[in-house]
Image (tube, rainbow, N blue to C red):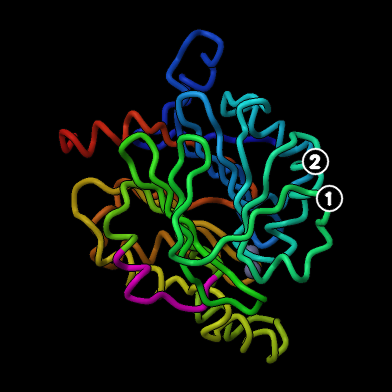
Amino acid sequence: MVVTVQAYHSFTTSSILQKDKGADMRGFAVLGSSSKANAYALQSQDAVLLIDNGFSCRELLRRLDSMGAQPAQVCAVLVTHNHIDHTRGVPLLAKKLGIPVYLPRPMTRVLPWKDLAVKPTDPEEEFMVGPFRVLPFRTYHDTDASVGYSIACEDLRITIITDTGRTDERMAEIAGVSDLLCVETNYCEHLLASGRYPPFLKRRIASSAGHLSNSDALALLQQLDEVTQFIFLCHLSGENNSPETVRELLDHHQVPCRDRTVICRRGEMYLQQLMDVKTRRNTGL
Ligand SMILES: [Zn+2]
Ligand SMILES: [Zn+2]
């Protein structure tokens, strides 16, 4: 699979190519996102925090390398929930790198990860991992327990909301104070309804414990800040959605951060430098 870093607005592909020339590599990366494999990374000055890993260990390390991150810098992996597209590569990666795995407490009862450094967490209980202050918050999904993460790092707040059947006031509140927000746009209602999935699966996806539709995500985005926020739309279904469908929806509605919104194509990799997010917030430019 070819790693693509999209040049889009403040995306600076040149800094990626210059990773050995002392460029500022601090950034947030969608290492890959789809119904098959999801992983995100946040790189601070000298530490990297991973969120989920649905990739093989080898592929994840290859993608980390593409963002200029070294395996030795990875301080932990956070897990959002117990679905294979988010956890497939977690055990081997954690073992290989010798890093702790933070996950919702109920997951510890069902996962056979006894030989890993598992750290159970609870929604709304903040904790520190290296330089990152992590706030897990509740999401709504058909699994033992699921959370989103809001991470404070270098005076910025980065939030991931994925695999949730609905949003709530708390999510909107956290999203509203985030500088960078990664939110699921899983399916288009019309494509899902008219698609080939069996009725039980359609009901599951569209339920309040399934996934966020494009309109659900749009409603959340419409509440955001007009000037400063950066958005990644992720976890698009290959069957019931497309980047073009999401783009069309954004084009037909008032979305405050449209020119800083990136629609993540399945499996591709995207990087946003934190420096650019800071500059935008501080100067509006
Ligand atoms: Zn998923
Ligand atoms: Zn899931």
Q: Residues within 10 Å of mark 2 (few under 14, many from 20)?
A: some
* Magenta stretch bounds: 164-173
- The correct choice, above or below, for 90 with respect to 218 in the image is above
Residue at the top extreme, as displayed: 21
Tell me residue 275's x, y (percent). Answer: 34, 28
Q: Residues within 10 Å of mark 1 (few under 14, many from 20)?
A: few
Residue found 60% across the figure and 80% down from its top:
205
Q: Nearer the viewer, residue 145 or 215?
A: 145
* Quarter occupied by the C terminus: top left
- Identify the disc placed on residue 115: 1
Label 1 with label 2: CB-CB less than 8 Å: yes
Residue found 75% across the figure and 38% down from its top:
59
Q: Nearer the viewer, residue 147 or 187?
A: 147
Tell me residue 32's x, y (percent). Answer: 62, 47
* Quarter occupied by the N terminus: top right
Amino acid residing under circle 1 = Asp
